[in-house]
Amino acid sequence: MFWQAVLTNVLIQRARTWETPVLTIIMLSQVFISSMLLGVEVLGLRIGSSPFILLRDAVEGPIFSRADYLNLIPDGNGLNPLLQNYWMVIHPPTLFLGFASMVVPFAYAVAGLWQKRYKEWVTAALPWALFAVMVLGTGIIMGSFWAYEALNFGGFWAWDPVENASIIPWLTLIAAVHVMIAYKNSGHSYFTATFLVLISFVLVLYASFLTRSGILGETSVHSFTDLGMFGHLLTYLLVFFVIAIGFLIARWKDLPITKKDEETYSREFWLFIGALVLTVSCIQVIATTSIPVFNAIFGTKIAPPANVFQHYHQWQVPFAIVISLVSGFSQYLKYKNTDPRKLYVKLVMIIIMAAMITSAFAYVADVYHNVMYVILTFAAVFSLCCNVPFLIDALKGKWKLAGASIAHIGFAFLLLGALVAAATSKVVSINTSGVGFGEEFDKSNNAKENIILYENEPVRMDQYTVTYKGDSTVGVNTYYKINYKTINQTTRKVIEEFDLYPNAQQNAKMQTIVASPDTRHYLLHDIYTHVSSVPLKTETAEHDDHTGHSADEGYDQPATYEVALGDTIRYREGIIVVKGINRNATVEKIPLGKNDVAIALTLQVIAKNKTYEVDPIFLLKAGNKFDFGKAVADAGLKFRFTNVLPDKNKLEVMVYQKPLAEKKWVVLKAIKFPFINFFWAGNILMMVGFLLSIFRRNKEIRVKPEEIKEIKLQSK
């Protein structure tokens, strides 16, 4: 709602003759969004969910009859630790701006159909469509950065239903932008351009419906609790869908659709083919993502794919190949028609060059084992080789014309990076020790891909020697220092050394950890490291002698010795010397009778160059034996003088020791991602390309005063 309001203020200044119809559509969207915040009932129908509603008004229960009910409700667990990341501060607002901006090209398309300005709206809407593509794409990239940096599933895209729902309108609007350009230059593909612009915003509303209605259930980590707005969201979606389809049907006979087919060797034809392939790609993603919706509508029990990565990759890789090839050779096509011979002459050298680069890259990146991967690599390299000459020409003077080439080059790098990083990522933390980590660990982790590190004990891991150097806590995060060394096995010299600090937050209530990785970045690969398991911290308390607790808690089982004066007892950290006895000992708050005996045994503890003395007491009172133990806290010892053995001329002493401190440890997983920087660089280049294209297309919408008068006359 906020972002649409911001965009509306911009449109008031820039929309000129489009202001009234365009803002009418956007205001209708604002009405629906605003109504979601009302939280009022009209004729028994609840409209919206107020963010200001009190808990006692939202939930019924006897507890709310008490005035102090808030004091009886425990605090929650707080914000999910995974969301406490700086990417999550900027990712959602950017994504929401992208979603909000999709309404602007939609509004222009509806306004064009409404006022029968079928051609003019395309030019006016194109910069806004590019803006929406750029911003939404940036938001999606930020989400990928967040997933890669903060999550420990080892990747940047999980094919989660809500991730899919966000990328689908982005792809359809990219397709729309291309056919809008084709229409501007050739007059072809008008219906396709209009339909894709309209459906892109409808798909944004569908994404909101999937996320906010609760229909996804447990199939997505992004789904929110059902706020009772299922019908509200569905109405919002259907109203705008009906508006889009209704105007297309109503104006069908008047649409400027050319009857003549495009020439095969024309740019507009292949832009249309590319848009069509992108659309089919989106349909496949929508179909799988919408399985929970189909189950809810038809009462079926279709299960989502067991392996989502394999499922989507087998479909999307062929689509990506076609798109890459088209984004390459279409640059050499002209609108209307192209001489095939000149086209082939230009492409032959590019194909040869692309084949040579592909051969080398496929070998270096280790993707030559899979035919589809090799073909995709060739397609991406081919697109790269096709677009670089145009980029060079554009940079010689007309840099604003470089937008398309830069975006296509970015797409090629994106594909290469995503392909190699996903297909050839290598787990380097291979567990060769055979040590298992328990059934609970195996439920969510692969023990063969995790190694255990004890503090200050180096372990060989692939080409590295890794050592757990300890941990430190800052706020709620505990950082684990992992030292990496690359050592020359012949000279034993350290070639490279660095430290990584993966962190984890412990959930004391759930006794689980939420881990975030740390990554060592190189030009051509990343070393990605996270902890899979750490010792859980437990709250401990010292117990003295009191009801419900033994005074001997926290010690190992005692050792009993029969000693005489002057004897020495050895223990693991030093010695204990029996120095003497005190026959006149007293016990606090216990009066001694005539025949009672209290004896203190003086013991000297020598450990770690320090000396301590302690006097445990043995008491014989009214024929009963008692003892009063004494502890040496610094030495981790406790003594009980338990008996006097006159027949042996010995004294009985029990020695308690604190258990040895458990070694600190972490279970660690490390992954090598080759060429991951190609993916990030490609994304950034695409956004830069879109930005340059916005500057170029923005110049085209400047309307002269005499043209405004003509438009007003046509609209009457």
Image (cartoon, grey):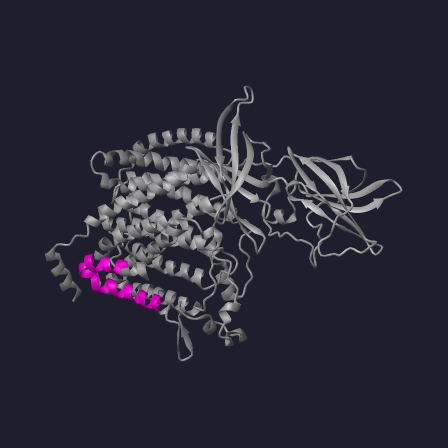
**Quarter of the image containing the N terminus?**
bottom left
Left or right: residue 31 versus residue 641 is left
Q: Quadrant of residue 211?
A: bottom left
Residue at figure coordinates x 25%, y 63% from the top left? 23
Residue furthest bottom in the image: 43
The answer to whether residue 108 is visible is no
Left or right: residue 494 versus residue 433 is left
Find residue 605 and report its horizontal and vertical position in percent.
70, 37
Q: Quadrant of residue 550?
A: bottom right
Q: Quadrant of residue 350?
A: top left
Find residue 11 and report its horizontal and vertical position in percent.
23, 58
Find residue 127 and report its horizontal and vertical position in percent.
25, 51
Give the dominant element type of the magenta stretch: helix, strand or loop: helix
Question: Eyeballing the image, is 486 above or below 244?
Answer: above
Left or right: residue 337 versus residue 638 is left
- Is 297 or 525 nearer to us in this picture? 525
